[in-house]
Image (cartoon, rainbow, N blue to C red):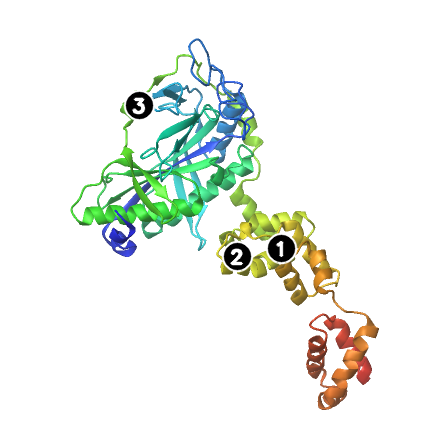
Amino acid sequence: MTVTDLLSYEDALASYDPVMGLEVHVELGTRTKMFCGCSTELGAEPNSQTCPTCLGLPGSLPVVNAIGVESAIKIGLALNCEIAQWCRFARKNYFYPDMPKNFQTSQYDEPIAFNGYLDVQLEDGEVFRVQIERAHMEEDTGKSTHVGGATGRIHGASHSLLDYNRAGIPLIEIVTKPIEGAGVRAPEVAKAYVAELRELIKALGVSEARMEMGQMRCDVNLSLRPPGREKFGTRSETKNVNSLRSVERAARFEIQRHAAVLSSGGTIVQETRHFHEEDGSTTSGRIKEEAEDYRYFPEPDLVPVAPAREWVEELRAGLPELPRLRRKRLQEDWGIADHEMQSVLNAGALDLILATMAEGADAASARKWWMGELARHANETGTELAAVPITPAQVARVSALVAAGDLNDKLARQVIEGVLAGEGEPDQVVDARGLKVVSDDSALGAAVDDAIAANAAIANKIRGGNLAAAGALIGAVMKATRGQADAKRVRELVLERLGVQG
């Protein structure tokens, strides 16, 4: 089904209610793999970070990574989950070349964390609670590279290359309960949930959660049902979606695709699907297995995990400030209204503002530049704010130049324009473009005298007590100096020249 075959989004939601389930895989930032001592460092030669254990060779025995367990508990606690007093690993059996053991060591009916929730804030400030079914520990697969085809997928490829360096890297899979009641906002809820989860994971320090590098990826499960019906429809699962925007687009596309199939009398096939960034569409992958198809059974080579309650409470007490609480505190510290903070969040500017403050800028000026000039540039160029080619340190330097009186806002905007154009650091742009504020009396005096001489009527008004008229003379001086005059000093000189007390 192509994009043009879809039912319109409005018509789809008029006829059906969407039900979602989101499965997010988080690659933990441990130094070694989940069940062996192999390094997890990126960029190594293919198949150089393997051993008999992660390759599943006979006679090798796994040992659980303690930091992986600790990270799983921290994630569970931050998601308001119950932490299991006793849980164990299972073998999830399936046969594919990127699984060297032909099974994945995972958790099935006994996850380490379960029954939690995460509150997420939508763009208009509404808070939606997403219920968490479970968070469980497992290992990643190897990487298959399909060569010779047009799409990079196995179909049409002449051969495949396998790299098992990633096999065995610790993962936490976080599974939501069915997300109902989101209605027309379901795609937005999906995006907001993954965004909030990513911020939470980063705050915990257990992963960098960089979606573009595969450190965090989302499977979007979606089904439709007629309004008022309790039974869920047949679901599809769009696999390994790796950006926030793509999560939203995948959910929207599947809503429209399901609706088109159902409205035409067709039947939804339970299957996995691939997401395509270029047009936001999905295509069929393979028929989706049920749990029994994986033939789960307890992992005989690993002892159960039984976290001591004292340890769990120590970890709970040591949790950092979580993103939602941090945002609330910052809003109070900055003294801004709800809608202003929401604008910062919607623009993706919060971390950029904080990084700029860490470089010495005050909160107000950091917000002003990121939410003003830089947000405008991002909108005009169609880029994410974080991708704009200027650093928080450079923005802080511009702010410092303004605070020191070396630049005014108009000149500062020109400096930012130069940095964005690749002309160098702020100070280099100031020197190259000759943008520094002119505040020296000898340099300004002649311009002030010229403005008074050219505007005798206005000068007389000022002498008569109409101080507001000084704005016209100041404007004339600013024009003559290409906006580089210190406006405050110009006003003082105008009044001095005219013998008027300010």
The quadrant in which residue 363 appears is bottom right
Reading the image, the residue beneath label 1 is 422
- For marks 1 and 3, give the one nearer the viewer: 1
Q: Amino acid at mark 1?
A: Gly
Work out whether 211 lies above or below 93.
below
The x, y position of residue 174, in whole percent, is 42, 33
Residue occupying image coordinates x 28% and y 29%: 289
Q: Are marks 2 and 1 in contact (CB under 8 Å)?
A: no
Q: Amino acid at mark 2?
A: Ala
- Label 2's element? helix
> Which dot marks residue 294?
3
Work out whether mark 2 precedes mark 1 in sequence or the reverse, and give the earlier one. 2
Work out whether mark 2 precedes mark 3 in sequence or the reverse, and give the earlier one. 3
- Label 3's element? helix
Work out whether 133 lies above or below 343.
above
Q: Between 190 and 422, which is closer to the camera in this rendering?
A: 422
> Which dot marks residue 378?
2
